[in-house]
Image: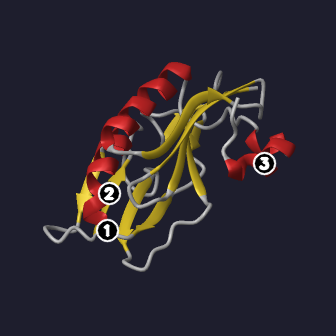
Amino acid sequence: MRLPPDHALQQTRPSLHGCNRSVPWAGSLSLGREAGSNRQTMFPFGHVDLRVRSAKDVYPFYSAVLPALGFHREWRDGEKLEAFSFQTDGELPKASWFGVIQDPDHVPNSTRLAFAVQDRNEVDRMAEIVRSAGGLRIEGPEDMPYTRVYYAVYFEDPSGNRLEIYYCQE
């Protein structure tokens, strides 16, 4: 099994990749119910505000990938398309959103955003969507040594930002 170069530290510290069972899965990212409970749980982040060199260049990619991950509601800044976002169902602040803002000086770095999905088949399905949408430097899907089951696909968006879609089981 091949590890992406930036995963060397994570290979020595597998606790960084523990599975969080209270996180709702794709398709219902903003609100879910804990197993055996009527208590609502909120996704652990409110929004992502991602910078890219050209919003127009990455829009086709994100307009295919984000709705498949449960971000169904779209907003765009009009014809100039320098910013756009996709939001989960529901109203703010309970809904989560993923925003993309153009910054011509943006330089991708080693930060990686990871999306949890419900099973291995969903990782495979999302990997095909990423490929079809123009994802770059795609690695996997493959099993990783972080937990008993950690199955992931790693890739970059057309602006070079690093992303991951994974399924994890303790």
Which part of the image, by quadrant, shows the C terminus?
A: top right
Within 10 Å of disc 1 (Cα), the crowding (few <14, some 14-19, many 20+) is many
Q: Is 72 left or right of 97, judged from the image as shown?
A: left
| Mark with earlier residue (3, 1) | 3
Q: Amino acid type of disc 3?
A: Ala
Q: How far apart are the two marked residues, 3 and 2, measured between alpha carbons?
A: 29 Å
CB atoms of marks 3 and 2 within 8 Å:
no
Q: Amino acid type of disc 1?
A: Ser
Q: Which mark is residue 107?
A: none
Q: Is 119 left or right of 9, judged from the image as shown?
A: left
Residue at 43%, 50% in the rendered image: 95
Q: Which residue is under mark 1?
A: 54
- The reply to whether residue 108 is visible in this rendering is yes
Asked whether 36 or 154 is in front, the reply is: 154
Residue 167, picture quadrant = top right
Question: Compared to 39, does 71 lie above or below?
Answer: below
Residue at 65%, 35% in the rendered image: 22
Q: Which residue is under mark 3?
A: 8
Question: Compared to 163, does 3 lie above or below?
Answer: above
CB atoms of marks 2 and 1 within 8 Å:
yes
Within 10 Å of disc 2 (Cα), the crowding (few <14, some 14-19, many 20+) is many
Q: How far apart are the two marked residues, 3 and 1, measured between alpha carbons?
A: 31 Å
In what element is the residue under mark 3?
A: helix
Which residue, as the protein is rendered here, is positioned at the far right?
A: 12
Q: Which residue is under mark 2?
A: 58
| Mark with earlier residue (3, 2) | 3
In what element is the residue under mark 1?
A: loop
- In percent of width and height, residue 62 lies at 34, 50
Question: Compared to 33, does 109 lie above or below?
Answer: below
Which residue, as the protein is rendered here, is positioned at the far bottom?
A: 105
